[in-house]
Image (tube, rainbow, N blue to C red):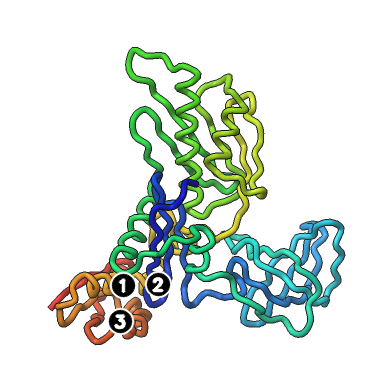
Amino acid sequence: MKPPLFVYLDDTPGEIRGIIRDEVGDQYFLTQFENEIPQHRLGARSVGRVRRIEPNLKGAFIDLGEEAGEDAFLPSHGGQRLHEGEKVEVEVVSERREMKGVTLKLLGKGEGEPRLLAPGPTVAEWLERLAPGVEPIGGVRAIQAGWDALREADGQPFIGGDVSVTVERTNALIAVDIDYRPPPGRRASPQDRLEANRKGLVRAAQTIRLRSLGGLVAIDLVGGGQDGNAVLKAARAAFGTDPAIAYGPVNRFGVLMIAVPWRFRPLAERLYRHPGVHSYWPQRAAVEVTRRLRHALLSDTTTARVTARCPQAVAELAAPLVARLGPRAHLKADDSLRASEHVIETE
């Protein structure tokens, strides 16, 4: 990743968003909701109790306490032996996704009842880790940056010119297709193909990072007979030198395989009930109404009253959040609108 040019922090009641942007585009979209279970956040440390050992899964399920709800999974490494009922100190290394729960790593022996020892880093702390020394921008610009980054994450990466990239997540892996169409009357040289692959790898890495995806990545490169060393060098420059990222050689079909560690919960799963149609979860819809109101209030400080119309069910969830915006912010229930719809009105 290039050095960040801008860092944004949107602190809206109900959700905090962090955006990191460089010259390529938006690289990270970090989000934290107030109603999240702190034991499940990336980096959270807890004392847990081994509920059951699963030899076939090569690990154990860990009870993190009553407030945590579902158990988390602790893979076994290095011949470690656990026993049911044993207390352990653990840290979240991967948030939940689809049918997979939270994944832990073992820190050592634990004492006392299952409980949270330390929450994971906040969005502001992640921004400082990923972009040290860059002062976050807040307010209207941060809200708009979040909307822009979300549109970029929801769409396909765009390069323009003669190179195009498609990134699709499947149940098994992330499929990336890099295409190159040379100008009319010109044959693609090996250097042209390498440059197209370099550009495609940069965009693919950005998109995967922005969507908070991980797992096996299969990249269909441009052309055959690749210079494997040059492609791997370009891939490492694009995806980074994190030792947890594994790079495979380019195979005889012109496909590069990369294993990227899962860390954050995928962005679409965090925000949407139905990611394919981008339908917000009710609580997420309530936060978005609050954010739209806050944007209107910050954009025009002279308007005495700003009202958001939204469905009754969303309005009920949004009411305590909107109350924190001050006396100028108001809600009005309107069941003629769909769950993800809202209208902002000024007086």
Q: Residues within 10 Å of mark 1 (few under 14, many from 20)?
A: many
* For the residues bearing labels 3 and 1, Cβ distance under 8 angstroms: no
Residue drawn 60% across and 75% down? Answer: 119
Disc 3 on helix, strand or loop?
Answer: helix
Q: Which residue is pictured at 38% across the width and 68% down the height?
A: 10
Q: Does 296 sit above or below residue 145?
A: below
- Disc 2 designates what residue? 282
For marks 3 and 1, the one nearer the N-term is 1
Q: Secondary structure at mark 2?
A: helix
Q: Amino acid at mark 1?
A: Val
Q: Residue furthest front?
A: 133
User: Where is residue 297 drawn, in percent x and y?
Assistant: 23, 75
Left or right of 196 in this view: 318:
left
Q: CA distance from mark 3 to mark 2?
A: 20 Å
Compared to residue 346, the image places residue 221 above or below, namely: above
Tag in front: 3 or 1: 3
Q: Residues within 10 Å of mark 3 (few under 14, many from 20)?
A: some
Task: Give residue 147's quadrant in the image.
Answer: bottom left
Tell me where residue 260 appears, x and y as whole percent: 61, 48
Q: Is residue 220 left or right of residue 6?
A: right
Looking at the image, residue 94 sits to the left or right of residue 129; the answer is right
Q: Is 187 placed left or right of 128 in the picture?
A: left
Residue type beneath disc 2: Pro
On the image, the x and y values in percent for residue 180 come to 42, 26
Label placed on residue 325:
3
The disc at residue 289 is: 1
Residue name at image x 37 percent, y 37 percent: 159
Give the mark nearer the N terminus: 1 vs 2: 2
Q: Quadrant of residue 52?
A: bottom right
- Mark 1 vs mark 2, foreground winner is 1
